[in-house]
Amino acid sequence: MFRQSGNKKALLALSAMAVFPAIAHAQDDEGEKKKPNMHELARVSSLPKAHADFSQFRYRPAGDKVIEQPEAQRILFRTPGGVPDGYAERHGNAVIYHDRTGRVVRVQSLDDENTGTE
């Protein structure tokens, strides 16, 4: 009788050792690998990227870096140090330029440029 209970304990111990390392290993893999967020998935997406023509945006602050945002139909201006310096958006037949506080600093009419009557 003692021998049977010993066999049951040994069998239970062996089965536990076979199951628990697999569970622990799966948890370690999940802990090490982080699921990608939506921004990371969008970068590697096979969907076509938004494209916009910003050649009509004439004004650029001197020395600023221009960052295009085709999804929002706007461009951002940043100083060489990376500080936001304003943005420009197209609204109908005009391009509106804003400073870093959001105040309108310049309005560029697109109708005049397209007809060549500047």
Image (cartoon, rainbow, N blue to C red):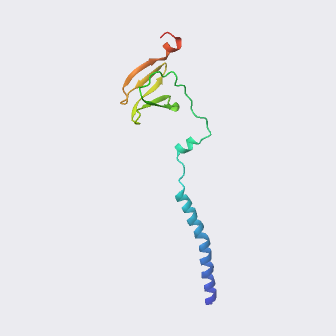
**Residue drawn at point x = 58 percent, y = 62 percent:** 26
Q: Nearer the viewer, residue 97 or 60?
A: 60
Q: Residue furthest top?
A: 117
- What x and y, as percent, mark residue 98? 40, 26
Residue 59 sits above or below residue 28 on the image:
above
Q: Residue furthest bottom?
A: 1
Which quarter of the figure has residue 45? top right
Quadrant that contains the N terminus = bottom right
Residue 72 sits above or below residue 43 on the image:
above
- What x and y, as percent, mark residue 32? 53, 58
**Residue drawn at point x = 38 percent, y = 24 percent:** 104
**Residue drawn at point x = 62 percent, y = 76 percent:** 14
- What x and y, as percent, mark residue 58? 47, 21
Side of 103 relative to 22 (left or right):
left
Residue 84 sits above or below residue 31 on the image:
above
**Residue drawn at point x = 44 percent, y = 26 percent:** 88
